[in-house]
Image (spheres, rainbow, N blue to C red):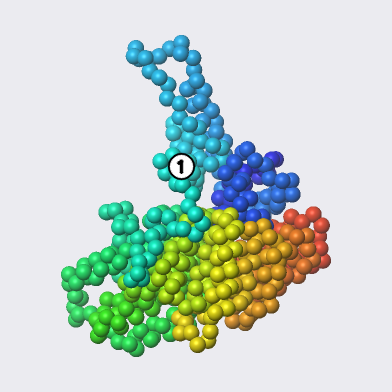
Amino acid sequence: MTVERWTGHEAWALRRALRMTVVGFAEYLGVGTRTVSKWEARGADIEPMPELQAVLDTALARADRASAERFRLLIQAGTAARAAAGRRRGSAEKPASAPVASAAPMSPVVRPAPMPGRSVRAARAAAVSAEPAARVARTSVRDRTVPPSRLRARRPPGQPGPDLQAVGGSGGPVGPAPQPGATPDWSTDPLLQLQARTVPEGGAPTVSPTLACAPPEALADAWVRARAHTPEPPGGHPAVGRSDVEAVQETVSFFSRVDHRRGGGHARTAVLQYLTSDVSGFLHGRFTDDALRRQMFAVAGELACLAGWMSYDDAEHATAQWAGSIAVKLAAEAGDAPLTGFALRAMSRQVLDLGQPDRSRDLAAAAVSGARYQLATPRERALLSMGQARALAVAGDRQAAMVALKQAESELAAASSADAEPDRVFFVSEASLAHQSGCVLRDLGDLRGALEAFERSVQNRQRSKFPRAHAITLGDLGDVQARLGRHDDAVATWSQALDAMSGVRSARTRAIARRIRVMTASKPVRVAGSEELAARVEHYLAG
């Protein structure tokens, strides 16, 4: 299928057909996130520039057969929706002299037509909506119309919303009390979730507002009280000792390093199995004192956070959200405020890639609030500030993003080997800061500043310990070089990125490979090495 004229509607349909997030699609095409958001916001009323039309042509031509068929059906559904809207408008505007079935006078009800490319609720209302294209539209497209009653006033940068209240003096997560049945994901005892051993798989979830706030301490107390009335299993609960806590910590440390070297696709299922079986059993055990119990819950929270991060890296977003929410709740019960911030920072990064910058900004603000930030070590505070800077940059808040970035630089400079740092931040380094700085500057439109930051990250990275991060940084660097017209440098950099991807199983590195394929194919002038690079990309994606 070919597209004669690309508009925001066709670009939106291609993104959905390829099953990509807004951020992922923007990176795939080599354009800014705000550019894709603007296309989708204006729908059929906007046409991308000619050179971007060529990029979209290439992306569609490279799509596999299933994606191309989804694209065709989404375009067909959009056409049907606009036609149905036109028929409704026409019937609503009939003259008053038209025959009326009832003797009582009736005023016509004019329903607002959905904007093209943004909603197919019209197709849902049509009587003939059983056709395949309309079925695809109903299951694939969310109505983005926001009623006036749900509009919120803009908050000052970095200030959390009402569902992300600051932490009190006692530390630990706080938030609004959930309404009965309204927030099952937060009110459900995490031990019951783990005991069920039902891990959600596949698909990108819609992150509801309630998933952006940590559970209040009252919920953790309620979980403990409820467990006291639970009958003990035959033989009673097993005794848990300090050696068990150390064993879980060693396992978390081992798999965390595997994740950084090999990607989330390696051992992700093993981590989830360990969490829902062995560690779940420990959490139900008998402890000699409350301090030991809190230590076990804290290390289990770190394991859940790792499972969520590995799932995010493997594009298993529903699993990542499930594990992330459990991590926050276990950290709440452990009374470990910095761990809560660490888990919320990971969730912020996930929803940022899912194309929800406002929710990402809320989560990032919650991660740095109160004791979550104050009780953290300098290195962990630097990581939390980097996450907030990324979310603010994508949201378009330049000033606040740069303030957060400067804060991260200051905190990392204050870090010392004498600090009693948690093992979960072993990867935070100058290379990490330089990479995140490059992403912030790129998202703010400062390509030359981003270029310098990415180059600094590449130079400082310990490549043998962090090949995935090195590959992602090289991919980002090549994108910026290409956008600055340095195509020869981009090809060389992307070739290095593919070298670093060897042995890495990560959806994020595969997304970089797809971006390289599109950007090299859409260049009007071939540069030396581009054909060899294209062949290597195809080999990597086929593996």
Residue type, numbered disc 1 = Val
Residue 80 visible in rendering: no
- Which of the two residues, 477 or 442, is positioned nearer the viewer here? 442
Query: Is 478 positioned to the left or the right of 367 in the image?
Result: right
Residue 35, percent from left and from top: 63, 50
Residue for point 44% across, 31% down:
127
Taking 259 as reference, is 444 above or below it?
A: above
Q: Label 1 crowding class (10 Å Cα cut-off): few <14, some 14-19, many 20+?
A: few
Residue 428, percent from left and from top: 55, 77
Q: Point out the image quarter for the C terminus.
A: bottom right
The answer to which quarter of the image holds residue 249 is: bottom left
Residue for point 62% across, 76% down:
431
Residue 1 visible in rendering: yes
The answer to which quarter of the image holds residue 163 is: bottom left
Residue for point 75% across, 67% down:
491
Taking 397 as reference, is 493 above or below it?
A: below
On the image, numbered disc 1 is attached to which residue? 146
Q: Point out the image quarter for the N terminus.
A: top right
